[in-house]
Amino acid sequence: MKTHQAVDRRSLLIVQEIVKKIEKCSLYDEIDKAISRCERWYNIHKLESIKEWLNMLDKPWDEIKKVLLDQSENGQRLRQSNPFCGVLTNKERWSIYSRFKKDEKRAS
């Protein structure tokens, strides 16, 4: 059974890979996609976290990146509605899940 802490750690690993990939790729394309994704989500679900992301996505990349990698409770909360979820391929995401699962088994 996964704990909230384990899910948060895995989420942080995923977002770290997302940040690396965005910085290698076209940054502005990914930000534009994230804005479009948030707008679609917000039209369906008027959640405050999505509104927060929409406001953040107008800021410079370094500020967005800081929020993505923030290990505080606020960072964990915002990662639950991470608008950069489409950056990684399914294969990349499953590779992280698999690596995380192995690391968790070793740690226990």
Image (cartoon, helix red, strand yellow):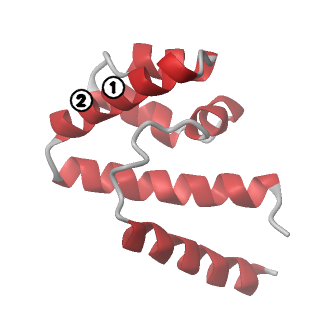
Q: Which amino acid does label 1 sit on?
A: Ile
The vertical placement of 58 against 81, above or below, is above
Image height check: is 84 above or below 1? above
Label 2 sits on residue? 32
Q: Do the residues labelled 2 and 1 touch (CB within 8 Å)?
A: yes
In space, the residues marked 2 and 1 are separated at their CA atoms by 5 Å
The image's mark for residue 35 is: 1
Q: What amino acid is labelled 2 in the image?
A: Asp
- Point out residue 84 in the picture as x, y percentages from the top left corner: 39, 42
Q: Which of 58 and 94 is in front in this view?
A: 94
Q: 63 left or right of 11?
A: left
The spot of residue 43 in percent (x, y) is 48, 17
The percent coordinates of residue 99 (x first, y second) are 55, 79
Residue at image coords 38%, 31%: 37
Foreground residue among 90 and 11: 90
Q: In which quarter of the image is residue 65?
A: top left
**82 versus 51 height, above or below:** below
The image position of residue 60, as x and y in percent, is 27, 22
Q: Residue 51 carries which label?
A: none
Task: Pick out the residue farthest to the front.
Answer: 44
